[in-house]
Amino acid sequence: MYNLLTGPGLWLSIGICLVGLFVRGVLYVKGLNWQLDRVAYTAHPKAGIKGALRSIFFWILPFGTRSWRTQPFMTVLFFVFHIGAVCIPLFLYAHNMMFQEKLGFSFVSMNQTVADMMSWGVIMSAIFLAIRRLVLPEVRILSTPYDYLILFLSAAPFITGLICRYEIGDYSFFLIVHIIFGEILLISIPFTKLSHILLFFLSRAQIGMDFGIKRGGMKGKGMAW
Amino acid sequence: MSEGTLCNKIPIQTDEALKILLSDTGGKQYYQEMKSLDVDTRLLWETIGKTCKSRIHTWLKICAHCGMCADSCFLYRINDQDPKQVPAYKIQSTLGEIIRRKGKVDNAFMMMAMETAWAKCTCCNRCGLYCPHGIDVGIMMGYLRGLLYQQGFVPWELKIGAGMHRVYHAQMDVTDDDFTETFIWMAEEYEEDYPGLTVPVDKVGADIMYTVNAREVKHYPEDLAEAAILFHLAGEDWTVPSKGWEQTSLAMFAGDWAACKIQVESVYDAMERLKPKRMIGTECGHAHRATVVEGPYWAGRKDGLPPAESIHYVEWLAEALRTGKLKIDPKKRIKEPVTLQDSCNYVRNHGLKNITREIMSYIVEPGYFIDMAPNREHNYCCGGGGGFNGIGLYREQRNKALITKRDQILDTGAKLVIAPCHNCWDAIRDLEEEYSIGIRWSFLKPLLIGMVEIPEHLKPKE
Ligand code: HEM
Ligand code: SF4
Ligand code: SF4
Ligand code: SF4
């Protein structure tokens, strides 16, 4: 079972994730339409690129925008959740050992204490994100079961990962569960809202170009996000 | 298929149809008929298939439902944090739902969507600055308005407004002759005080082609005179086109994209005909948005730019003051607390945030200018944008929406509000009428007239 999951299973889920994201990215860009979107995407490349980069940069910077600054609680949750969600899968020592063994390459690994803190961070912030959805009326009205499912799918590999890390219960059983959740997450990325991993950058680039080219970017210093 | 005689899917094309619809005071019969107007669900779904491409589609799909946009919307804040006013909710429960149902929605749904699109959003685009994914609900509401307009679900005044643009190429029943005659007549009225004051009509190759808002012609002709006087004093080589002089677009508020194209092409034709170095529009926000920012796309111009460089009045004014074409008498500068309304349409949506402050630095005695908070691209809508000001059906909601601006103004302590935008000016006038907070409000032109120095050679001879 373990070999099946970390062999063909791993290849397949990573493959589906990457190919799927690639297709979504291509479809997104192909579906942009200068006249319908009312943005002359290609006519002003310099202003467009500048607008796109500014729009991405300030938003991936913690407290980098007015919106992040005015909602500090959400900002902390978002960044703690996302830093862990992006770094742990790629830079955890145990993951890299497996990558090396099964895929033949690995990334740098991070310090175990940092990794522990990040994983706890992901789980704690996921819990608070769920509570936030339940408690705040303006978020509750938007939330659908699908949103909770996505949150659960995202947090599950981290919860099971920590169970393995502390060797609670039957290690080999929880390791299998952990890998299954991880692979479900990978596979669901291109088909669900989780596609935002790529589409965030494209959507931000788009609105950045909109403001950069059409809505004032060529007039002054650009949007003070 | 049930279509009303007044309320139907057919745009207004003739003066006669305009008059008939106008005579239905307040749209009584119009709204009555709307209650039984059918939805052409096939057309709706087909249109979405053709026009809802990756940008809007992705916005609807990846919206994290995180609610970070809630507090950015002044209508959410002013309506006691009603969750139904959260931008993401407003669009998900209308456009999002239409798409989920593949266009199969009924009359009651469209009525709800109409109220959402015109009474719960002014298309101020502020929420777009607060969403981590860059989702601009204002843009989507504009798109939704287009779908609603196509189906005949549009507020009475805006159906008329869009019709005006189709028939008169202006937002009101002002003809080309009315325009030139009024402008010339107004200049004549002031010729004694400003010898040599003229209104050059259809001059080819002038430095400036000036375009206006039709209501200046109809209701505020003083504004035309002031524009002429300031160009005259600045020694500008300017002209107005006898056709294509109207810069505004109620069609944009209505979501009548075909009329938007007709309107803006009339102005572009004037530019092609008169070949001015630059086009300058009057102190209006949505007019600038329509003609300079969005217009090129309606007209199919691939570079996204009008045929001639086009700037807002505040850009010209700042330049004239900066270069000394217009000189302010320092004694006449404003010496009372004064604040400034940032128009979403050219500040947030066209980057002109510092230029108006530069003007303030010339016309206000240092220490007297007080910014509202928040300001610049983060300003709140005046409360009457996107057509809200003009829709009788939603007057009550609009009046409530004015409270945001009222409180922002009160917080500055200023008694004078400069509003270089027709819509904002109206909203601020209405908020004073509604809430009597003891303020005055003004465009820039009349203030400038009172403080510019008249060059020796332009003074009237005794
Ligand atoms: C570079 C990669 C990523 C970027 C730029 C990114 C960006 C975003 C943004 C902008 C939001 C919406 C704002 C918000 O909820 O506050 C969001 C939400 C979310 N993201 Fe990501 N994300 C990334 C990767 C991931 C990954 C790898 C996961 C899962 C493991 C993930 C799971 C989620 C979840 C569950 C939400 C919804 C949070 C909630 O319930 O409010 N994201 N992400
Ligand atoms: S802030 Fe953006 S992602 Fe969050 S609910 Fe609003 S529109 Fe959706
Ligand atoms: S565009 Fe303005 S009015 Fe409309 S939802 Fe966004 S913030 Fe609110
Ligand atoms: S009327 Fe003025 S403040 Fe209101 S939306 Fe339009 S430009 Fe913005």
Image (spheres, coloured by chain):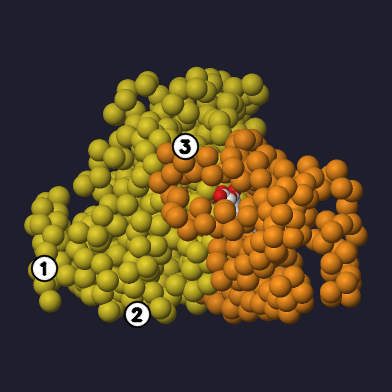
Chain colours: A orange, B yellow
Chain name for mark 3: A
Q: Nearer the viewer, mark 1 or mark 3?
A: 3
Percent position of residue B127, x then y = 51, 48
B361 relative to A14, above or below: above
Identify the residue position indicated by label 3 in the image. A135
Identify the residue position indicated by label 1 in the image. B4
Residue B459 can be seen, yes or no: no
Marks 3 and 1: in contact by CB < 8 Å? no
Identify the residue position indicated by label 2 in the image. B46
Q: Is mark 2 within 8 Å of ligand 3?
A: no
Label 1 – label 3 distance at C-alpha: 46 Å
Chain name for mark 2: B
Q: Secondary structure at mark 1?
A: loop
The residue depicted at 75 percent of the width and 56 percent of the height is: A171
Chain name for mark 1: B
Label 2 – label 1 distance at C-alpha: 23 Å
Tell me which corner region of the image, top left, top right, bottom left or bottom right, holds residue A98. bottom right
Percent position of residue A100, x then y = 89, 70
Query: Does label 3 lie on the same chain as label 1?
Result: no
Q: Nearer the viewer, mark 2 or mark 3?
A: 3
Q: Amino acid at mark 1?
A: Gly
Q: Amino acid at mark 2?
A: Glu
The residue depicted at 39 percent of the width and 62 percent of the height is: B96
Q: Is residue A127 left or right of residue B436?
A: right
